[in-house]
Image (tube, rainbow, N blue to C red):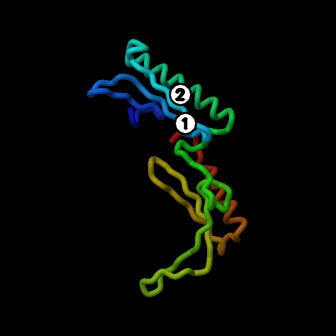
Amino acid sequence: MKGEIGTHHITRKKYKGRTTGFQVRLQYSCDYPISKSFYISKYKSLYTALVVAIEFRDAEIKQLVAVGEYPIDKHRVRLQKNNRSGIVGVRRIKTWTKVNGVSVESGSYRWEATWVKNRKAQKSTFSEDKYGAAKAKKMAIDCRNARKSLYR
């Protein structure tokens, strides 16, 4: 099931090499994980169990989106305790340079926007020296927000 379109958050349950059903797991809710199993014995066929699991998952995601507990990104993202920008995926970092093979702080900072595209980390940086502190932060936030989508 992994990697197939439309089956995210759904895993195949197996026993002794045979598929016995499907499990839906959503861990985006801050209060509790949502988990429910759909067995072939109850639904009489593999296809019916999968269809019911997909319908359950879609209904749960719709409810989570309505109350604001489902993140914009597919990946589990939470604001870290040490996040100073207030935006997930945006951070302020020091600029380092190499002098005779040794890394040394250059004294300047930049804002970095990070996101995941096709299972690979991507980033863009914006220098405070070039744009100014406020504009560089705003550019990083705008860059991060521009790359958000529900599913990639």
Against 137, residue 20 (above or below) is above
Against 137, residue 58 (above or below) is above
Q: Amino acid at mark 2?
A: Arg
Against 129, residue 48 (above or below) is above
Against 59, residue 110 (above or below) is below
Q: Is residue 91 found left or right of 103 in the rendered image?
A: right
Disc sitting over residue 142 in the figure? none
Closest to the camera, between mark 1 and mark 2, is 1
Q: Is residue 137 found left or right of 4 in the rendered image?
A: right
Q: Residue at x 71, y 65 (%)?
A: 135
Task: Identify the residue position indicated by label 2 in the image.
Answer: 57
Query: Closer to the camera, 97 or 33?
Result: 33
Task: Identify the residue position indicated by label 1 in the image.
Answer: 33
Q: Residue at x 27, y 27 (%)?
A: 16
Q: Secondary structure at mark 1?
A: loop
Residue 109 pos. (x, y %)? 62, 73
Q: Are marks 1 and 2 in contact (CB under 8 Å)?
A: no
Q: Amino acid at mark 1?
A: Pro
Residue 8 pos. (x, y %)? 47, 34
Residue 132 pos. (x, y %)? 70, 71
Q: Residue at x 48, y 34 (%)?
A: 9
Residue 149 pos. (x, y %)? 58, 43
Q: Cα distance, mark 1 to mark 2? A: 13 Å
Which of the two discs, 1 and 2, labels the residue nearer the N terminus? 1
Q: Quadrant of the N terminus?
A: top left
Crowding at mark 1 (Cα within 10 Å: few <14, some 14-19, many 20+): few
